[in-house]
Image: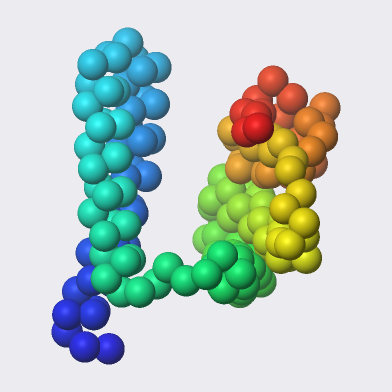
Amino acid sequence: MSGTRDALQQAYEGEAKAALRLRVFAQKAEEEGYPQIAKLFRVIAWSEEIHGARALKILKAIKTTEENLAESFQSEQGVAEVAYGRFVQEAEAEGNHAAALQFSQSRDVEETHAKLYREAMNHLLEERETTYHVCQVCGYVADGILPEVCPVCGAGKEKFKTFE
């Protein structure tokens, strides 16, 4: 990888991390009664996303939808099978039960993401429309039907956000 290409990759990764961190900070500011600070965090998060998107475009990392689905499927599958499995083992060995649970639930959710990508690849030409429901506790994504409880973490249906 060239120096510039490596720098672009690092810029993308840094901007993506910053955007997530700032969105989480915005949620916390809202919870603590600071709506203007929350707005500031959200605005800067959006700005960071623009920076990251520009780096991805220069890297030519955005391909056809079919290629993007295949790459996303491979990524989710690898994270679920390799990374989170190792993370769970390390957390359990250290006796960090909270981290082990978070890693375990994330692994299970990543496997669901891979399944959703695979289904989307299979239905790409028919462009099947569906409603998704995302558990706001663990990130589980339900395709079409809102579950009464999250199959991964057990949260009630009121903890799901619907995307139509």
For image coordinates 78% across by 31% down, the residue present is: 146
Tell me, yes or no, if residue 142 can be seen here: no
Tell me residue 27's x, y (percent).
39, 26
* Pick the front one: 23 or 130: 130
Image height of 78 relative to 25, above or below: below
Q: Quadrant of residue 153?
A: top right
Q: Quadrant of the C terminus?
A: top right
Q: Hey, which residue is sitting farthest front in the picture?
A: 125
In the picture, measured across the screen, residue 44 lies left or right of residue 73, that is left
Tell me residue 77's x, y (percent).
65, 70
For image coordinates 33% across by 53% down, the residue present is: 17
For image coordinates 56% across by 65% down, the residue present is: 65
Tell me residue 81's x, y (percent).
66, 71
In the picture, measured across the screen, residue 153 lies left or right of residue 6, that is right
Image height of 14 relative to 163, above or below: below
Q: Quadrant of residue 133?
A: top right
Image height of 107 relative to 160, above or below: below
Tell me, yes or no, if residue 46 can be seen here: yes
Tell me residue 99's x, y (percent).
54, 51
Q: Quadrant of residue 70?
A: bottom right
Q: Hey, which residue is sitting farthest bottom in the picture?
A: 1
